[in-house]
Image: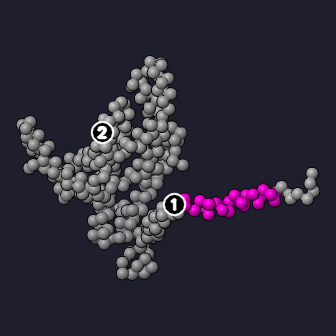
Amino acid sequence: MNSNAPPTHLFNTEVSKKKTKPHVLKYWQLYCMILPGILFFILFKYVPIMGSFIAFQDYNIYKGILGSPFVGLKHFETLFTYPEFFRIFKNTVVISIYQLVFGFPAPIMLALLLNEVRKIWFKRTVQTIVYLPHFLSWVIVGGLVINVLSPNYGIVNEILELLGLERIFFMQQPEFFRSIVVASGIWKEVGWNTIIYLAALASINTELYEAADVDGAGRIRKIISITIPSLLPTIMVLFLLRIGNLLDLGFEQIYMLLNPLVAEKGQIMDTYIYTVGLLGGQYSYTTAIGIFKSVVGLMLIVSFNQISKKLTGETLY
């Protein structure tokens, strides 16, 4: 053995330094690509968190955060003692559950149906048609919904009249509002969400289907025994992400369809925050509502993540 050779640990240290030191310089293009995303989250996600402190103040836009008086949990007490808030909270939860029950399975079923189509041209045509509405803004979609359901010239009421039925004022009756919200949301987003499930379906090992064919399994049996279990990880991850946003229905959709006649069933937390916070100037109170929404979302995602871990073994973290 050569007595002049350097110790092994010194050699390993030098090798590790050579591997780690130039990593940023070696892959600087990749770091430049992720830099805008990092800056986006810092500026628009983390920096605004500091503004949540105004929920504990009587915030005055002229005095700023540093000059506004600290009031502790005053606005949270108002939140839980104001009767109107619980009605709005109920509307938000009910509409969100409707969307979860009817809207969440819709892209899964559409993906399963498209996966069974053997004519590629027909499959691609249907895919294009169903995901095009995603690119329309809610201003356009809201106008379409109002026109389609119009009691004077809407196509739905025209059909009702041809069937000998009376015209219905859909947009003026509270009992129809939630169904209209859910249906329009499904129509707009079902095609776009289907893309995720179609990508997951494309990754399923085809040998499983070939083995099922040998065993004499039909299409329904292959969907139940192969397709759905293979989709389960994707379904659970998307479900957990959706359940964490249970109280975030989306301001644009509701605001475009809302009117004073249906406000009793249609006013949700997002539109309430806009009306009371931005238009009414109660910034501290509506910030407290925002913190409440975030805490509820965090509790839901942690709870359902544990449930999913025990039942299916799939988790977000």
25 in magenta? yes
Q: Which residues are magenta?
A: 9-31
**How many numbered marks are there?**
2
Q: Main secondary structure of the magenta part?
A: helix
Horizontal side of 128 relative to 54 (left or right) equals left
- Give the camera-side residue of 17 and 139: 17
Q: Residue at x 52, y 41 (%)?
A: 314
- Give the camera-side residue of 40 and 152: 40
Task: Estimate the x, y position of residue 218 in percent, counting from the top left.
Answer: 40, 22
Task: Estimate the x, y position of residue 104 in percent, counting from the top left.
Answer: 36, 43
- Give the camera-side residue of 95 and 213: 213
150 relative to 255, above or below: above
45 in magenta? no
Numbered disc 1: secondary structure: helix
Q: Residue at x 33, y 56 (%)?
A: 250
The amino acid type, in three-letter code, at marker 1 is Ile
Horizontal side of 54 relative to 264 (left or right) equals right
Rounded to the nearest whole Å, what is the CA distance between mark 1 and mark 2?
A: 35 Å
Which image quadrant is residue 17 in?
Answer: bottom right
Crowding near pointer 1: few (<14 within 10 Å), some, many (20+)? few
Instruction: Give the labeled residue for mark 1.
Output: 34
Q: Residue at x 41, y 60 (%)?
A: 292
Task: Estimate the x, y position of residue 181 in percent, counting from the top left.
Answer: 26, 49
Instruction: Give the labeled residue for mark 2.
Output: 126
Which is nearer the N-term, disc 1 or disc 2? Answer: 1
Task: Estimate the x, y position of residue 177 in percent, counting from the top left.
Answer: 22, 49
Q: Could you tell me if residue 86 is visible in this image?
A: no
Q: Residue at x 45, y 79 (%)?
A: 66
Horizontal side of 314 relative to 167 (left or right) equals right
